[in-house]
Structures are given as structure tokens and as C-alpha cells.
């Protein structure tokens, strides 16, 4: 006879179930992000209609979030599809910064606050600290680039380090994909380990 769930156990499982996320190899994430350097050479936040699933803007351009989307997609983690499906089922769990009433599969995965919400919902959040050793290759870090107001940014922790031991970050902050020492340059607002 199959075991029966009590109402309390069912409610616990429902409330404490992290959304599914594919297994990710941190070294492959770093390699896939690094492969964008010299290929993605510009920054373009323009709204575009994308194929779904697996849609992307032209590889020579993009925003900071596209570095993450492209790197994880190389490991069969299509953030466009994963985030859109979760957002469609749980729209209220995502930021309302853009005045939308429903998910938009063309842009939602390209917005830093949505990626942070998704990674948190997937149980991938780890503590934000000021210790370099807490940031591992393949981790994803989000920042606020402004001291007043909000300008979110996101990047991937590299396996290379600066002279002082600080991990470099692979990101696109305006001039295409680059690997730079910016980990502690801005206020960190999120730290994720997919």
C-alpha cells in the first residue's frame, strides 16, 4: 500500500521544494564564459524578439546577463526556458521593476534581478562576504554599480586571480565580454553557486 502524506508533510514539501536546476560543472562554466571574450565585443540592451527556447541576441553583442545565459546554456541549462517556466508559474516571486503583468520570454532571462530571483528560488544562493576565498570559479555574482539608486550587474567568477589573490570576473559591463578584477569594486548584492 503506498504511503500517504499527511497534510502537514505535504505543505512542508510544497513550501520547501527548490525548483529543479541541471547539474553544472564550474570549470565548464568558466571555460564557456571565457570563450565569449573577443567574440562578444559590444553591449546592446535593446529589446529583441528571440526564438524560444534557446533564443539569443547576436553573439557579437549582449548585456551582462547574456554572459551567464550563454555560459550555462553550453551545459544544457537554458535560463531562457528555465526562468520563463518558473516565472509563468510563480510570477509574484519575481521583481516588478518593468511594469509587466506576465512573463516575457524575450527579455526576462536577460534581466539581472530576475536571474537573482531565479537562482535564489533554485536554492543556489550562498552568503555574500568580503573574503576572496569564499568566491569559487563558476560562481555567479551580482552587484549594484551605483552608490545611490540601482544599476544591477552580474558576472562569473573566473579560475584566474589578480596579484592580490582576488578572483577575476568574466562579465560584460559595456565593452563586450572581459575578464577583470572587479569582485569588490562594487557592492555585491547576490552570490550564487549553480
Image (cartoon, rainbow, N blue to C red):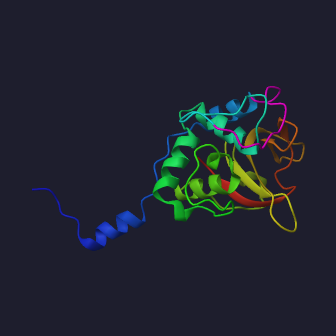
The structure residue drawn at horizontal position 64% and vertical position 38%, both measured from the top left corner, is 49
For the N terminus, the quadrant is bottom left
User: What secondary structure prevails in the magenta region?
Assistant: loop
The structure residue drawn at horizontal position 36% and vertical position 69%, both measured from the top left corner, is 12
Number of labelled discs? 0
The structure residue drawn at horizontal position 88% and vertical position 38%, both measured from the top left corner, is 175
Q: Is residue 47 magenta?
A: yes
Frontmost residue, 91 versus 184:
91
Height in image: 89 above or below 73? below
36 lies left or right of 193? right
Point out the residue furthest to the bottom here. 8
83 lies left or right of 130? left
x then y, percent, for residue 126: 62, 58
Height in image: 169 above or below 35? below
The structure residue drawn at horizontal position 88% and vertical position 66%, both measured from the top left corner, is 147
x then y, percent, for residue 164: 89, 47
Point out the residue furthest to the left here. 1
x then y, percent, for residue 111: 69, 51
Q: Is residue 54 magenta?
A: no
Q: Which segment is the magenta one?
A: 36-49
x then y, percent, for residue 161: 82, 41
132 lies left or right of 120? right
Amino acid at each position: 500500500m503506498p504511503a500517504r502524506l499527511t497534510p502537514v508533510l505535504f505543505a512542508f514539501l510544497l513550501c520547501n521544494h527548490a525548483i529543479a536546476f541541471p547539474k553544472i560543472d564550474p570549470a565548464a562554466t568558466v571555460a564557456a564564459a571565457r570563450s565569449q571574450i573577443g567574440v562578444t565585443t559590444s553591449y546592446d540592451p535593446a529589446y529583441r524578439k528571440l526564438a524560444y527556447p534557446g533564443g539569443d541576441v547576436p553573439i557579437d553583442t549582449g548585456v551582462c546577463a547574456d554572459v551567464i545565459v550563454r555560459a550555462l546554456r553550453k551545459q544544457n541549462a537554458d535560463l531562457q526556458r528555465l526562468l520563463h517556466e518558473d516565472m509563468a508559474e510563480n510570477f509574484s516571486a519575481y521583481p516588478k521593476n518593468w511594469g509587466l503583468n506576465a512573463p516575457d520570454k524575450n527579455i526576462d532571462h536577460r534581466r539581472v534581478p530576475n536571474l537573482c530571483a531565479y537562482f535564489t528560488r533554485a536554492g543556489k544562493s550562498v552568503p555574500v562576504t568580503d573574503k576572496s576565498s569564499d568566491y569559487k570559479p563558476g560562481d555567479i555574482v551580482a552587484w549594484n554599480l551605483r552608490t545611490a539608486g540601482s544599476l544591477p550587474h552580474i558576472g562569473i567568477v573566473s579560475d584566474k586571480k589578480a596579484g592580490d589573490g582576488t578572483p577575476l570576473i568574466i562579465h560584460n559591463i559595456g565593452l563586450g565580454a572581459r575578464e577583470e578584477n572587479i569582485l569588490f569594486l562594487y557592492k555585491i548584492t547576490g552570490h550564487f553557486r549553480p
